[in-house]
Image (cartoon, grey):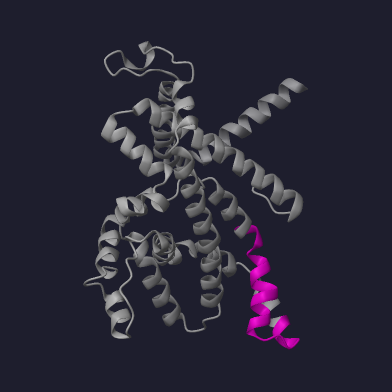
Amino acid sequence: MSKGTGVVKSSALGKRFRRYLPIYFLMIPVMLWFFIFKLGPIYGLQIAFKDYNIMKGIWDSPWNNFKHFKKLFTNHYFPRVLGNTIKISFLRLITSIPSAVIFALLLNEVRSMLFKRTVQTISYLPYFISWVVAGGIFTLMLSPQYGAINSIIKFFGGEPIYFLGDPKYFVGTIIVTGIWKGLGWNSIIYIAALSSVDQELYEAAHIDGANRFHRMIYISLPSLAPTIVMLTTLGLAGILSGGFDQIYNMYNSAVYEVGDIIDTYVFRQGFERGEYAFNTAVGLFKSVVAFILVMSANFFSRRVVKYSMW
C-alpha cells in the first residue's frame, strides 16, 4: 500500500515539476546570482581570522588569533564611528518610515488619478539619481557663497550656514536629503498595501459619518501595521551601514567628528592602507549585529504587537 502511495506521489510531483518548468528556468539566473555573489564570498570570510597575504592566498595565509577583532574593539577611533553610524542610521529609520507612511496615506486620498500618477512619478525620480550626482547637486545648492538656499537666507538678512561643513548641521542635512531622495520609492510598498484594503470598509465608515481623516486613522493606518513592522525589522538590519554612498559623497574632514561612519572608516582603511583582512572582520561584525537585531525585532514584534515576518 505504501509503495503504491509513493508511486502516486512521485507521479504527481513529476507532473507538477513539468507544469512549472518555465518558472524554474526563470529562477536559474536568480539562483546563480545568489550563489555567486552571496554564498560564494562566504569562503573569503576566513581572512578575517588570518594575516592575509595576497601572495600566499586565502588558504595558506596564517591564522592570527582574532587579531583584527582585537584591533577593532581596542581602536580609540572605533567608538566614535560606531556611535555616528548608529545615530545616523537610527535617525534615518525613524524619519524615513513615518514620512513614507504619511506620503502614502495622503496620496491614497487623492481622487484624481492623473494628479496622483503625476505626483508618484515625480516623487520616484530622485531615487534613480545616484548619490554621486545628488551629492554634487546638494553641494552646489548648499554652498555658503553661491548656493540657492544660502542666497535665500542672506536675502532675508540671515548669515550663511555651512550645511556640509559645520558639525551642527551636517547630520540634519544628511537626514533631510536622504528623505528627499527615498520618499517616493519607500512609499511604493505602502501604496500597494493600501490598494488591497477592502473599499467596503471605507464606504461603511462614510455611511457612519466618518470623514476622510477618521477613515485614514482608523482604517488605512491599521491596515499598514504589518507592512510597517516588516520594513522596520528589515531596516534594523542596516543599522550599522549608515548610508555609505550618501555620506561619502557629501562629507569632508571638517565633519569627521559627526559624519564619519563605519563604512567610510573601513573604506579608508581598506583602499588607502590595504587592510583587507581588517575590513572583512568589520564586515563580519556588522553582519552578526544585523542578524541579532533582526531576530530580536521579529521576536519583540511577534510578542508585543502580534505582527512578525516569521
Left or right placement of residue 277 versus residue 304 in this view: left
Let me know if residue 31 is in the magenta part: no
Image height of 284 relative to 293, above or below: above
Instruction: Residue 94: name its quadrant.
Output: bottom right
In the visual, does 135 lie left or right of 84?
left
Give above or below for 90 relative to 158: above
Quarter location, residue 196? bottom right
Q: Toward the viewer: 44 or 239?
A: 239
Q: Was residue 223 drawn as part of the magenta stretch in this picture?
A: yes
Q: Quadrant of the N terminus?
A: top right
Q: Residue furthest left?
A: 146
Residue 160 pos. (x, y %): 30, 73
Residue farthest to the right, as pictured = 1
> Which residue shows up at 26% across the image and 35% down it?
272
Q: Residue 171: horizontal and vertical position, in percent? A: 43, 59
> Percent position (x, y) of residue 268?
31, 38
Q: Residue at x 44, y 67 (%)?
A: 184
Query: Residue at the spot x=45%, y=40% of the render?
Result: 27
Rendered location of residue 190, percent (x, y):
55, 64
First to last magenta residue range: 204-227
Q: Main secondary structure of the magenta part?
A: helix
